[in-house]
Amino acid sequence: MIISSGRSRIRSTVVMLAVAALALAGALTAVARTTATGSLAVAAGVEDEGADCPVTLPGSLTADAKLPDPFQKLNGTRISTKSDWRCRRAEIKKLAERYVYGEKPGKPSSVTGTVSNTNITVNVTHNGRSSSFSARVELPSGSGPFPAVVVVGGFGADTATIKAAGAAVINYDPLAVGREGTPRNNKQGAFYSIYGATSSTGLLAAWGWGVSRIIDVIEQSGGSVLKADAMGVTGCSRYGKGAFAIGVLDQRIALTMPIESGSAGVPVFRGIPGEGAQSLSSAYGEQPWLGDAFGSFTSNPANLPVDTHEVVAMVAPRGLFIMDNPHITNLGPKSASVAALGGAEVYKALGAGDNITYWSDVQDGSHCASRAEWRTPLQQNIQKFLLKTGNAPGTIRMSSRATGNLSEWRTWTTPTLSDGPTSTTSTTSTTSTTTTTTSTTTTPPTGSGCTASVSINQWTGGFVATVKVTAGSAPVNGWTVSMTLPSGAGITNAWNANRSGNSGTVDFTNVSFNGSIAAGQSTEFGYQATGTGSGMTPTCSAR
C-alpha cells in the first residue's frame, strides 16, 4: 500500500495470502492464487467463504466511543493467523447484518436466466415465490469473454474508461430489486417479492442480493460472454452506498469501487456526528437503505458492536478502490478516510496492503463528477483485479481538507499474523505489532507560546505523522515546529505546512490559512515518511 498526498510512492511487499475456505459444496479450496504477473488474484469462488463458521452474537452491547478491534473475536481473544480471518470476517458479517444492513439471504432454491451481448435476465424462485429482473450489458471492443463491472443505477465510475480498459459494463437498476420511496413496513421490489414486504433487510443488502443473483446467472452461462470470476462493482452517492455493500457481501466480486458514498456508506458511524455530515437519523429516515435494526443506533453509534472500518476490512484481501469528495462535508469524507485507514490495517495484516486504494485528493468539488485524478488508478485497478495483467500498488491519497487520524479512534494495535493454521489447544493469542501509535508532547509554555504533539501511524517501511500545534495563553500569529527524524527516515510529502528539508532536523512552518491560532486552540499538519518514526520529540516556537 502507498499512503501519500502527492505523487511519491512507497511500495510494500505483497505477501501471498493462504486462506482455507470451505466451499458451499463442502470441498476445501484455496482462494489465494498468483497470476502470471505475480499479482494477487483474490476473488473467491463462493458468495460467502465463512458460511460454515459458527457465530454466536453477544447477548448485550457495551458502549465504546472508539472503533471496535477488527482482530478481536467475539470470545475476547485476538486472531493470530491469516487463516483465522475467514471466521473472524464471518463474525463481522453477522454483526453488520444484525445491526446495520439486515440479513442478506444466500442463493435461493432456483436461479435461472440468460446472458447475451446486450442483456442479462434473472429469474428467481424460493419458498413458492418468484420474481424476475434484468440488466443491460455494454461490451468493450475486442473478443470475449470479458470481465465486467456492475454500475449501480448507471451512476458510478467513468464507464468510458472502464470499457477502454477492456471490461464490460453491466447497467444494474437496483430499484427493480429494492424500490426507494417505500415505507419500512411495505418494501417493494424483486427481493421483497421473495422475502416479504415487511422484511427487516434494508435496500442496500437487497441490492447486493440482486447482484449476487446476476453473478449466479453469469456462472451458469458457461462464460462465453462474461467472466464470473472477474467481476467489479461501482456506484456513486446512494448508489455508492449500494456498491460498497454489494462488494462487501459477495466475495466473488474482485474489485469494489464506491464513490462519494456518504452516511450509510463508507464513513465510520462514530465519526459522522462530530464531522457535521448527514446525520445517521437523516440517512436512516431518508430511505430504507439500512436495516430496520439500525434505527436503535442513529443517536448513539457508540453502542454499535461494529463500524464501517470493519466493513471495509470484510473486502480484504480483494481489490478495493474508494473514491471520495473532500469538498462536501455532508458526505463525511474525514470519517470515510478513518474507515479506510482502519480497514487498511487488516489488509496489511493479511499481507495484502497493496490491494486497497483510498483517494480524496481531488480539485473539483462537484458531486459524482468524472474526475481526471481517478482515471489512472481506475485503469490500474481494472488491470490488476479484473484483467489480471497489472500489479500497481494501492494508494491512499487523502486531501488535506478532510484528513482522518486513525490514532484518535482506536485503542487496538495491528498484530503480525502468521501463515500457519490456528492452534486448537491454545486458549490465548499472542501478537506483536507491525503498526504502532505513539504520541509525544513538548513541555507546555509558561504564558504565551505554543506546544506541539505528534501521533505516529507506523507500518513496515514507513509512517504517517500527525502533528498538533496548540497556542498557550495568548494567540499565536505564526509558528515553527522542529523535529529530528530518526536515522534513515525521509519525508516524501507533507500537508498543511511548509518544511525546510526531508531528513535530519526539519523545521515545519505554518501555511497561509493555519498560522493564526486563538489562545488555547489548536491546528494540525501532517507528513508521510519512509523508515521509522519512533522517538521524535517536537518543539514549537511562536512568531
Image (cartoon, rainbow, N blue to C red):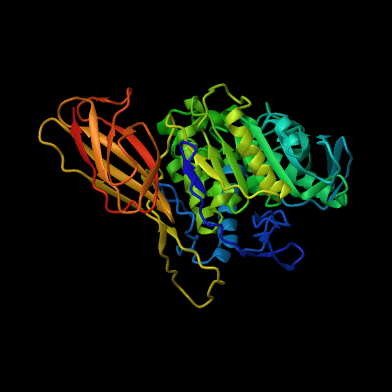
Question: Which quarter of the rendered picture does the C terminus lie within?
Answer: top left
Q: In the rendered image of this protein, does residue 169 appear above or below residue 19?
A: above
Left or right, residue 383 beside residue 423: right
Q: x, y percentage for residue 104?
A: 68, 47
Query: Residue 262 sits in which quadrant?
Result: top right
- Residue at the spot x=69%, y=45% of the render? 383
Q: x, y percentage for residue 408?
A: 36, 44
- Residue at the spot x=24%, y=37% of the render? 481
Nearer the observer, 535 or 252: 535
- Can residue 30 be seen from the camera position used here? yes
Left or right, residue 543 beside residue 497: left
- Can residue 177 be seen from the camera position used here? no
Q: Residue furthest bottom?
A: 425
Q: Residue furthest left?
A: 446
Query: Residue 412 sits in which quadrant?
Result: bottom left
Left or right, residue 149 beside residue 425: right
Q: x, y percentage for residue 282?
A: 53, 28
Q: x, y percentage for residue 364?
A: 54, 23
Q: In the rendered image of this protein, does residue 516 appear above or below residue 465?
A: above
Left or right, residue 522 beside residue 370: left
Q: In the rendered image of this protein, does residue 420 appear above or below residue 167?
A: below
Nearer the observer, 235 or 419: 419
